[in-house]
């Protein structure tokens, strides 16, 4: 049995190494590298100002740190069940902590500080993923995936599975209320455009961000949903839907990158921000790129 598994993995590795990339996004002769394995379910990759990537193993309530030179190390155990994460302009790691349905950040002592919880007097369904604008506003998705760590009797309580905007002054408003299950979310570095995936409806939409954080001009972008998402220096949007699917700003599919496991989330890391970092179930993977990630 072990021999058969080894042969299968060897064949898969050879197939992945033999992938051809026509878009020019992937560095010449670059190969997918497994940076780590043995996790229960990896999620939430977020790149720090120094290029290091923080990611979660949510079922085990841990956050790990990837350094392109030193590899992976455990950063924190007991994270509030962190899922999606993102660094803000102050260098704080902000997280969707669904143990208590909160948004929070980790202080200099790695203590989780609550930023917000609840909406209209009721608990949120379970914050999942987030994006922070250059001005500090936070947009986050709030689907419902029942968690085994929630207390008995906990149930979905918001009437819609929505997307919310948390302003720098702490005010919150729901800005999307017509999705089946919102999940992945990413914005452009100029703070003008927001991409949001409806994973259950298998679609991704594009919006114009208004000065008050609301969204306008809902436009169909891609015929794929997505778990996590990221964007590169050329404005290409990376979706995780079976593979890593790359769409240009016009909504045209320009690249498909297959990994040994189904991707859950993605970001750019490394000192030069040119390493595509993918969380994929029980493993995490890297791939050198010709493009760079942006904040």
Image (cartoon, rainbow, N blue to C red):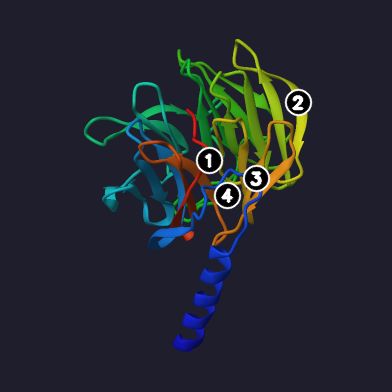
Q: Give the number of the mark in front: 1 or 4.
A: 1
Q: How many marks?
A: 4
Tell me the number on the disc at residue 23.
Answer: 3
Circle 3 packing at 10 Å, graded few (<14), some (14-19), many (20+), is: few
Mark 4 or mark 3: whose residue is earlier in sequence:
3
Mark 1 or mark 2: whose residue is earlier in sequence:
1
Relative placement, left or right, of 271 versus 32 is: left
Please, which residue is most extreme toward the top here?
211
Relative placement, left or right, of 241 versus 154 is: right
Residues under numbered marks 1 and 4 in contact, where contact means CB atoms less than 8 Å apart: yes
- Quarter location, residue 164: top right
Relative placement, left or right, of 130 versus 149 is: right
Q: Give the number of the mark in front: 4 or 3.
A: 3
User: Where's residue 58, x and y in %?
Assistant: 42, 52
Circle 1 sits in a helix, a strand or a loop, which is it? loop
- Quarter location, residue 284: bottom left
Mark 3 or mark 1: whose residue is earlier in sequence:
3
* Disc 2/disc 3 C-alpha distance (Å): 28 Å
The answer to which of 203 and 155 lies nearer the viewer is 203
Residue bearing mark 1: 128
The answer to which of 28 and 269 lies nearer the viewer is 28
**Residue displayed at 59% across by 31% down:** 234
Residue bearing mark 4: 145
Q: Residue 260, can we see it?
A: no
Mark 2 or mark 4: whose residue is earlier in sequence:
4
Residues under numbered marks 2 and 3 in contact, where contact means CB atoms less than 8 Å apart: no
User: Where's residue 229, x and y in %?
Assistant: 57, 40
């Amino acid at each position: 049995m072990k021999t058969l598994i080894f042969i299968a993995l060897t064949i898969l590795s050879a197939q992945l190494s033999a992938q051809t990339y026509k878009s020019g996004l992937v560095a010449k002769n670059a190969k997918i590298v497994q940076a780590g394995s043995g996790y229960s379910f990896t999620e939430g990759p977020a790149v720090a100002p120094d290029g290091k990537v923080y990611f979660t193993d949510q079922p085990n309530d841990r956050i790990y740190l990837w350094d392109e030179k030193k590899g992976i190390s455990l950063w924190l155990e007991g994270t509030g069940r962190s899922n999606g994460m993102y660094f803000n302009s102050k260098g704080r790691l902000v997280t969707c902590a669904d143990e208590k349905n909160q948004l929070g950040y980790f202080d200099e002592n790695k203590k989780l500080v609550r930023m917000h919880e609840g909406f209209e007097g009721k608990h949120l369904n379970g914050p999942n993923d987030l994006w922070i604008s250059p001005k500090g506003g936070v947009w986050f998705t709030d689907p419902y995936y029942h968690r085994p760590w929630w207390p008995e009797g906990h149930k979905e309580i918001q009437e819609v599975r929505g997307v919310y905007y948390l302003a720098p002054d702490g005010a919150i408003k729901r800005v999307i209320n017509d999705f089946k299950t919102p999940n992945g979310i990413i914005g452009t570095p100029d703070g003008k455009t927001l991409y949001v995936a409806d994973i259950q409806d298998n679609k991704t939409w594009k919006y114009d961000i208004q000065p008050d954080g609301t969204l306008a001009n809902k436009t169909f972008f891609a015929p794929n949903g997505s778990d996590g998402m990221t964007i590169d220096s050329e404005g290409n949007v990376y979706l995780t839907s079976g593979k890593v699917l790359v769409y240009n700003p016009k909504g045209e599919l320009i690249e498909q990158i297959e990994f040994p496991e189904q991707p859950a989330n993605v970001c750019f890391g490394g000192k030069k921000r040119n390493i595509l970092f993918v969380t994929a179930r029980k493993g995490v993977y890297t791939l050198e790129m010709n493009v760079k990630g942006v904040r």
